[in-house]
Image (cartoon, rainbow, N blue to C red):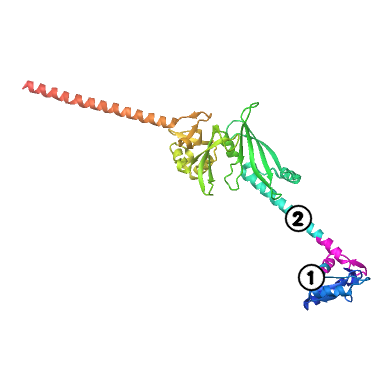
Amino acid sequence: MTINIADAEMLSSFAEEMASYGYHFAAFPSDQITDSGTIEFFRTSLDAQEYCLVMTNDADYFENMPIESLIGDLNILMKSGINTSCNEAFDLTAFARLEREKKELLENNLNINTMNQKNLEYLKDQLKYTGFGETFEAELKENMLKGDKDFKIIHTGIMNNGVPNKDTLTVELNFKKSDQTDMYFFNSYHVNLQKEENKPGLEQTFYINKDSSSITMKEAYNLMEGRSVNKDLKNKEGDVYNAWLKFDFKETDADSAGNFKLNQYHQNYGYDLEASLSKHSIKELETPKFKEDLLNSLKKGNLQSVTFVVSGVESKMYVEANPQFKTVNVYDGNLQRINHRESKEQKQGEAENKSVSKEQKKNIDADSDSEPENKKNNKKSKSHSI
């Protein structure tokens, strides 16, 4: 439809008025300027089509369109910022179509940008809660913009767990694009733990779950150090259960090539971490807050520093959970394993006390035996003198 720009506002008012009277279609000459004098309105599509057939000849050609479309095109023109006060022929239909396409493209781009931003935030949260911090935004953006099917980010750190060592942890973070959408997902991370320079490291792949049961980087390190980690897990039916996890470095998992087998000590296995700790005179157990922190740290698989108190003397020790044997492992300040030293010292003390008690009793019995003998001798002497 070609109109005079100066007539746009009047034509819009006219079309809205006719629509209010129940007219739903407009017919107009396609090769002439359409104004209030050349446009006709009809209640049905059939009436509009018949009008166009009758009016069309070798010189003129007529078209029809829904009145809502006409009003929409005119509104687009008036909101576009074009000067509508000048007299100028204007292709309203083509202009409105281009404006709609531009708007749709802009909205699609905005939707894509919004989706990409949400995807970025989702990946950042996944990395954060898996223990990799918040430093990968630039690398994530760069790789996502490339649009590749998958990509990796390499992360290297020194892990010392509060004790004097320099274990190097190199991690490959694996991301993959969905087959159905452009969304990327953090699927797994591959760990290489190198304890000594110029020697092959210990390797393991950890998979990311949709819930909070994913193993964090610190937990992965503790597992690869041979310690145990406590997690809430889900079975195939989706039921939550609690278990201690520990690697069996002598056996690989048949379902995952190259990965070490991960043993589970189910909540029904009967390991009581708190009870195992209470067998030792650990100072931190006397304060509820310190006790809670100690239990939480050990459940994450940490080798935790504690204070032992033996015969009133405090000493720094380290403990770790040992669910397999339902106990805790104890190490001295030099990280040398202690085999129930405190219990042995206590038993030795008790044995010494028992030994002293027996000796005292023996002495008392000896004194008792000698006293009647003296008395007997005295009695005998007196009897003899009589």
Residue at screen point 34% across, 30% down: 353
- Direction from residue 249 to residue 18 in the image, left or right: right
Q: Earlier in the sequence, mark 2 or mark 1?
A: 1
Nearest to the eye among marks 2 and 1: give it: 1
Q: Is residue 93 magenta?
A: yes
SS of the residue under disc 2:
helix
Rendered-image quadrant of the C terminus: top left
Say what amino acid the circle numbered 1 marks.
Glu
For label 1, the residue is 68
Q: Which of 15 and 140 lies nearest the eye of the viewer? A: 15
Query: What is the number of callouts on the image?
Result: 2
Percent across and percent down for residue 179 are: 69, 48
Q: CA distance from mark 2 to mark 1?
A: 27 Å
Rendered-image quadrant of the N terminus: bottom right
Q: Which of 26 and 271 lies nearest the eye of the viewer? A: 26
Q: Quadrant of residue 139?
A: top right
Q: Which of 196 and 51 lies nearest the eye of the viewer? A: 51
SS of the residue under disc 1:
helix
Residue at screen point 59% across, 44% down: 214
Question: Which numbered disc covers residue 222?
Answer: none
- Placement of 77 over or under 339, stated as above or below: below
Q: Which of 48 and 36 lies nearest the eye of the viewer? A: 48
Question: Which numbered disc covers residue 110?
Answer: 2
**Range shown magenta:** 74-100
Q: Is residue 161 magenta?
A: no
Say what amino acid the circle numbered 2 marks.
Leu
- Placement of 61 over or under 237, stated as above or below: below
How crowded pointer 2 is (Cα within 10 Å; few <14, some 14-19, many 20+) is rated as few
